Image (spheres, rainbow, N blue to C red):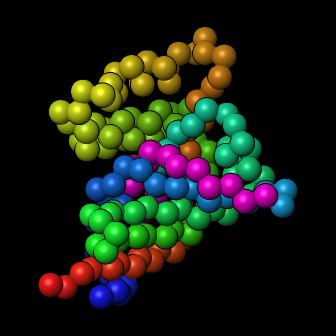
């Protein structure tokens, strides 16, 4: 059985999952890339080093964001968000990064492969050659679909 997700189900997926995909378009090129994220009900927060994704979103801030929650090939949920990229700097960027890290820690408690302490140090290292860009995506529209096998 397939169907559409209601807003509460969409928000549950956005609040629980930590890996999504950003789709952006600029200069006649479409680019889709995986990224970790945090959601607060209005914005999707993320961070990245300078690169093609950031360059393209600066040129065209209208993006698509996609998240999956998959049990197996016949039991999955998928969310699509249409939104607008907004770069954050100064105190608002620091607050956003703190929120992002807290959400990441909540979802990875007990996962020894993820060290948020090291990530925070990297982001606050002003001597770093490659600067970290903190951003959020204003959620304008969201939709979701699912497939569930009934036994």
Q: Is residue 119 above or below residue 71?
A: above
Residue at the image point whose x is 61% and y is 11% from the top: 127
> What residue sits 72% from the left and 59% below the top?
30
Query: Is residue 13 at all visible to an observer of this figure?
Result: no
For the C terminus, which image quadrant?
Answer: bottom left
Q: Look at 48% across and 20% down and name the residue there.
A: 122
Residue 73 rendering spot, x and y as whole percentages: 34, 69
How far from the left and from the top, in percent, is residue 72? Answer: 29, 65
* Along the line of sight, the residue nearer the viewer: 109 or 121: 109
Asked if the stretch drawn in magenta spans residue 39, the answer is yes
Measured as percent of width and height from the top left, residue 44 is found at 46, 55
In the picture, which quadrant includes the N terminus? bottom left
Q: Is residue 82 left or right of residue 58?
A: left
Work out whether residue 102 or residue 31 is closer to the camera in this orientation and state it.
31
Q: Is residue 89 magenta?
A: no
Q: Main secondary structure of the magenta part?
A: strand
Q: Please report the bounds of the magenta region as a residue range.
A: 29-43
Q: Quadrant of residue 113?
A: top left
Q: Nearer the viewer, residue 89 or 29?
A: 29
Q: Position of residue 146 (x, y in %)?
A: 35, 78
Tag count: 0
């Amino acid at each position: 059985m397939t169907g559409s997700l209601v807003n509460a189900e969409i928000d549950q997926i956005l609040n629980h999952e930590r890996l999504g995909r950003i789709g952006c378009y600029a200069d006649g090129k479409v680019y889709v890339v995986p990224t970790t994220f945090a959601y607060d009900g209005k914005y999707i927060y993320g961070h990245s080093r300078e690169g093609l994704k950031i360059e393209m979103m600066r040129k065209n801030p209208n993006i698509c964001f996609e998240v999956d929650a998959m049990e197996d090939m016949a039991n999955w949920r998928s969310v699509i968000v249409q939104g607008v990229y907004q770069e954050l700097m100064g105190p608002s960027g620091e607050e956003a990064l703190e929120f992002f890290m807290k959400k990441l820690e909540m979802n990875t408690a007990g996962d020894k492969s993820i060290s948020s302490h090291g990530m925070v140090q990297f982001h606050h290292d002003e001597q770093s050659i490659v600067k970290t860009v903190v951003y959020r995506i204003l959620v304008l529209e969201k939709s979701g679909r699912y497939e569930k096998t009934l036994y």
